[in-house]
Image: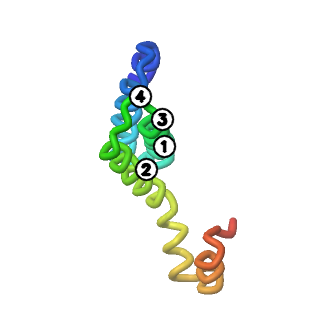
Amino acid sequence: MLSLASASGKKSANADAALKLGLLHYKEGYLKKSVEFLARHFELARTGEEKDQKMIDMSRINYGIAEANTKIEQYKKLVLNDTQALLDWKVNKKFKKA
């Protein structure tokens, strides 16, 4: 789908394909792949020929939710098991690699 959209040369077709693939991967539980496509959709929405603020906002929300869900397990581990690391994260907004 994305290759067809790319061949058309239209950013709007690319953005639409990236959104659909991102949401499909998200629904199937492939979060990392979903984040890749939703990030691409967000970038295309922001830089496209047609600046549709509503679409940009929707894209930002979808991308943010998918990105957050990739990190939720790590966050739950911090909350339940490692208070000091949680405080460090709250201060620095970076996770320690375990």
**Does the residue at mark 1 contact the one at mark 3 (Cβ under 8 Å)?**
no
Few, some or many residues within 10 Å of mark 3 (<14, 14–19, 20+): few
Residue 92 placed where, x, y %? 65, 73
Q: CA distance from mark 1 to mark 3?
A: 12 Å
Q: Decide which of tag 4 and tag 1 comes sooner along the chain.
A: 1
Q: CA distance from mark 4 to mark 1?
A: 18 Å
Kindly identify which numbered label has been placed on residue 47: 3
Q: Amino acid at mark 2?
A: Tyr
Q: Which quadrant of the structure image shows residue 15?
A: top left
Q: Nearer the viewer, residue 70 or 47?
A: 47
The mark lying in front, picked from 4 and 1, is: 4
Q: Which residue is mark 1?
A: 39
Q: Amino acid at mark 3?
A: Thr
**Does the residue at mark 4 contact the one at mark 1 (Cβ under 8 Å)?**
no
Few, some or many residues within 10 Å of mark 4 (<14, 14–19, 20+): few
**Does the residue at mark 3 contact the one at mark 4 (Cβ under 8 Å)?**
no
Q: CA distance from mark 1 to mark 2?
A: 6 Å
Q: CA distance from mark 3 to mark 2?
A: 16 Å
The residue at the far left in this view is 54
Residue 94 placed where, x, y %? 64, 68
Q: Amino acid at mark 4?
A: Glu
| Count of marks placed on residues | 4
The mark lying in front, picked from 1 and 3, is: 3
Q: Nearer the viewer, residue 3 or 97?
A: 3
**Does the residue at mark 1 contact the one at mark 2 (Cβ under 8 Å)?**
yes
Quadrant in which the N terminus appears: top left
Q: Which residue is mark 2?
A: 63
Colouring of the image: rainbow
Q: Which residue is mark 4?
A: 49
